[in-house]
Image (tube, grey):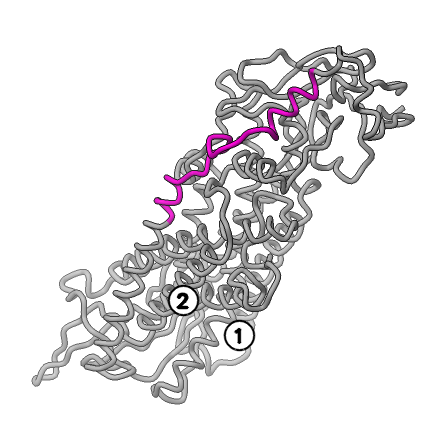
Amino acid sequence: MSASRHWYPPSHPSYHALPKSHEDFDSIRSKSTAGTGTNFYDRSLTVRMYALVGVAFSTIISCCCITTGIVIIIIQGANGVTPLMRLTGAMQDSDLPFEILKLILNLLVTICTESTGFVHNISLRSALASDSRLRFNTNLRLLTAGHGWRNPNGTLFNGIMVILLVISYTSSSLVVYINYAYSSDGSHADYVAIAGLPLFLLGIALLLQVVIAIAGIRAVEIPTWSSSPFDLTAALVHHTQLTPVAFRCMRSVSDMNGDGGPATPSKTQPSAWRAHPSIRKVVIFLWVVVAACAGWGAFVMHIWDKVPSTRFSSPPLAMSTWSLSFNEKSNYIGYYMPDAGPQWWILVFINLAVVQGPLTLALHCSELIANVIRDERQWRHATTRKGLHTATNPLTAILTHPICIVLFVTKPFLHWMFGLSFVVSDGAADGVLGRFAIFMLTAQIWNLCIALFILACCFTFVALRRPRGPQPATYGHLQTLANVVDEWSPVMWWGHKGDGPQCCHAGTSDHPLPDVRMGFAYAGSDVKSSASVS
């Protein structure tokens, strides 16, 4: 029989009639709500400093891109490029300099968008809390909005942020080209060059993201800059935006919609897939992107076979010609744009954004899985020897959590791999781009598909994995954390705290606690229950 069946919590008016011997639970619970001053929770002003340094870095990079792009456009025109490095010797026949520069550029874009994204996420989290709509510490930043169209954290500006994020990665894919500098005798020197217009648009996209992020933090009061769900929960409890619910000390996030009351500890906890509704959508979307990439590869192979005019004399696809990047034996299809005028840049951007946009959104949505798993891992430290440290540095959280490291490295790498698959080029002559040619490389598309497949498998596995142990799973769910944490301290341990007439009590403390008792009912030391536990 369920532990909560036939159990009814006492009504609020009867609380004053409880015997004095049962007042310990109330005194413990009061420690989580009676704190005053900024020392009650960590406002993480150091994290704010790091975040603003990241925003300043993004501003500098965006201004450099805008200035350089304007100079190139003024000197060379809208289709102009400027040389960066001359290729000599074996480098003339290698794509390595181009690919290294593209990878570095994608890494810079990732750092800038992550920096502004962190600030935007903090302001969105505070906006949702002020609207009483914040449920989890981690949310889909660009797909969750506050109230009001003019709100920097509202639907309109979130939509703009999505477009700007796609433009950032799309522009970075169009910046690097080869430039042939011809001499009077007909010979030429080869240079790695950058195009002015895509660089200018990249700078504008990065700068507008900075502006929206700064507007967001100015539009709302931010109680804490910490990315820790514990600092956020403590802040919300302190500001009475979140109220702990008694008698739910052994209830996980998946039990939030059920009846309260006694519960026996479970050997395993629900997975993130079951506990967080958005996790399921993200995992499904990841697999949709994998399927779309496979369909793209099959489509290119079909067009190469059925439409000879798109082959550009490329050889058939074979395992012997398979490679990571383009070479003279690569299989591909391609087509030319009618002209090289500025108006055709728009069409090139649309072509690229339509294909690259789903990849950008999939990687953005994957942040939800990584951060939710990170939040749960932090909570489960409460049963370890060292205990749970509530305050965390966001850089440390990323660098010490494998899935966060994987995602941070994967973002620029997969965008770089996309750039190997979808190539816009035909080079520039004497600093001016010619007609745009768009090539889709078959082997490189399948390489991207394989990489996406591996990523989707990894994230599906962690989303379906069930944590072991009786500690209730929270996955950063704020109400659940408020319910299971009854004593706040910088370092906390979770475990058995006392026996009651009918049920035991589990909670947190500033010193190590004994393990909870399997098979015993837990609800809180105030509980008087007639429940039978099976």
Q: Nearer the viewer, residue 384 or 467?
A: 384
- The kind of residue tagged 1 is Asp
The residue singled out by tag 2 in the image is 208
Residue at 64% in and 34% down: 474
Camera-near label (1 vs 2) is: 2
State whether residue 22 is above or below residue 483.
above
Q: Are marks 1 and 2 in contact (CB under 8 Å)?
A: no
Q: Which mark is residue 305?
A: 1
Q: Give percent across and percent down for residue 518.
A: 73, 15
Magenta stretch mostly in which secondary structure? helix
Q: Which stretch did the figure color magenta? A: 24-51
Judging from the image, what secondary structure is the residue with disc 1 in?
A: helix
- The quadrant holding residue 84 is bottom left
- What percent of the width, then of the height, locates residue 104? 30, 56
Q: Which mark is residue 489?
A: none
Residue at the (55%, 38%) spot, across then down: 235
Up-down: is 430 above or below 90? below
